[in-house]
Amino acid sequence: MTARTPAKNKSKRNRRRHRTIKRKQRKIIRFVSAGFMLILLSVIIIHFVRLRNSFFHTFDDSEFSDKYLVRGVDVSHHNSFINWEQLRDENVTFVYLKSTEGMSHKDRNYKSNYRAAKRAGLKVGTYHFYIFGLDGRRQAEHFISTSSVHSGDLIPSIDVEHSPINVDSRSKSSRAKMLTELKNLEQALFEHYGKHPIIYTNKDCYIAYIESEFPNNPIWICDLHHEPTIAEDKWVIWQFSHTGKLAAATDDIDLNYYRYSFTDFQQLLMP
């Protein structure tokens, strides 16, 4: 076997060292490129999230402000001070006020909110928070005896959503009881007012309870992330924010769009 000369050994070592350097350089380039792409992607995501979030806390910045011209808010005792005159000056047309919950609870600010909103020239509606499974007729009686619903006011609304008191139970017996009493509530309000109440709900509850059970009721849908895609032909009001920013409201306020024109809006009013 022929011995290697020092020159050949040195040349081989140089080639190995050169290949090692090249491999390290390629790794560094890949690492830097991956890091750059990660940073760029993060910046894009942050920008998108900030931009998207801005759509859903104000009327003015929303991409839908030119599409849906009739604006509204909804209010309960959880809201603090509201300047109702200023709210009207911010081009808000209507407000839904919480009046009752279950068979006995009354919203402590309902009466004063109703009077102030009417004085400001807003179209006012009243809603009831439905407690799953409790006697629907008694809930209706409680709402009717407490609430102010007059000619020119908005059709009453029933709030149907999960909460700590309205547990999401998909068992057949629980769902059947929930739907039976909700139908009793809806029927009693229809008999009294001559109008099917608007049902306020979100995507999950609409699919679980409302979609196949209440064909005659207009839908007020809550979707805090996207323009509504469910209840395609039935939704008339879209609640798009729980964190609305209005000069007239001290704290966050719920924001809504009516789907159609100012002329069509008259169809939501009591005769």
Image (spheres, helix red, strand yellow):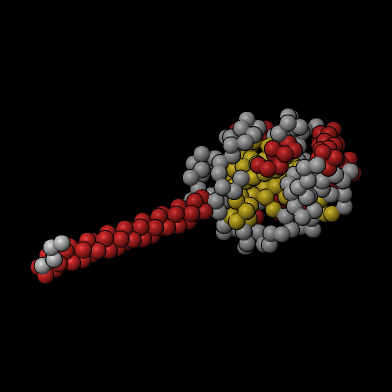
Q: Is residue 104 left or right of residue 240?
A: right
Q: Nearer the viewer, residue 102 or 98?
A: 102
Quarter of the image with the C terminus is: top right
Query: Exactly how many numbered labels are in the figure?
Result: 0
> What percent of the width, then of the height, locates residue 55?
51, 50
Kindly identify the residue that appears in the image at 68 percent across and 43 percent down.
204
Tell me if residue 7 can be seen. Answer: yes
Q: Nearer the viewer, residue 101 or 52?
A: 52
What residue do we see at 31% from left, 58% from top? 30
Q: Is residue 129 visible?
A: no
Please tell me which residue is depicted at 10% across the width and 67% down the height of the picture: 5
Seen as rendered, the residue at the extreme bottom is 6
Using the image, determine if residue 102 lies above or below residue 213.
below
Residue at (75%, 44%) from the top-left corner?
160
If the image is split into quadrants, where does the N terminus sit? Answer: bottom left
x and y percent of residue 4 in the render? Answer: 13, 65
Relative horizontal placement of residue 186, taking residue 71 as reference (left or right): right
Q: Where residue 58 sits in the image (x, y, percent)?
A: 54, 52
x, y percent for residue 14: 16, 66
Residue 263: quarter of image: top right
On screen, residue 39 versus residue 89, left or right, reads: left
Tell me: 207 left or right of 31.
right
Compared with 5, 194 (above or below) is above
